[in-house]
Image (cartoon, helix red, strand yellow):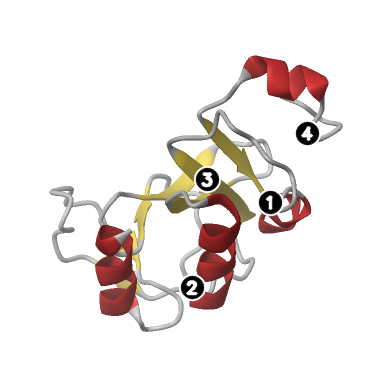
Amino acid sequence: MFPEGWSGEAAAFAPSSIAGTFEQMCDLEQVSIPSLSHALVILERAGQPRLSEDDRDRLWRAFRLPVFEQVIGESGELLAWECEAHDGLHVESRHLPLEHETVDTSPCACGRTTPRLAPSDGRELLRRVAAYAR
């Protein structure tokens, strides 16, 4: 929506959440965005590395907001998204390549039964505990 990044126009919009790549969020670490109150959405392309716990901690220290990942396709379509349970990313599209992913088909703590991409670093319990503690 704001191709030039954070600007006066973006500030005037007063978003409660923002979405962008991890790199874009890192560029905003030093910007005070007082209207943010809900979440950061980190956008990734299929096949890109997912956020590490260190990445999530960095974003938490900078913004003090929950972080949610979304995987989007080349034309911006939603392929997978992370719910409030932070227990992997719910697969939303058959166009998401799964050959290098661990897929969890057990019901999610959020109540959804869709398959999920398992958390990338194997520390899913720690992530869930930390998310609820925040």
Identity, as a three-letter code, of the amino acid under mark 3:
Leu
Mark 4 to mark 3 CA distance (whole Å): 14 Å
State the residue in front, 27 or 87: 27
Q: Tell me where residue 87 sits by quadrant.
A: bottom left
Residue behind mark 4:
6
Mark 4 to mark 2 CA distance (whole Å): 36 Å
- Of all residues, the one furthest to the bottom in this rendering is 122
Determine which of the numbered discs, if any, sits on residue 25 in the image: 1
**Tag 1 or tag 2, which sits nearer the N-term?**
1
Number of marks:
4
Image x and y of residue 104, in percent? 26, 69
Does residue 52 lie above or below 110 as drawn? Answer: below
Image x and y of residue 18, in percent? 58, 36
Identity, as a three-letter code, of the amino acid under mark 4:
Trp
State the residue in front, 77 or 35: 35
**Tag 4 or tag 1, which sits nearer the N-term?**
4
Residue behind mark 3:
40
In front of the other: label 3 or label 2? 3
Q: Is the C-beta separation of discs 3 and 1 under 8 Å?
A: yes
**Tag 2 or tag 3, which sits nearer the N-term?**
3
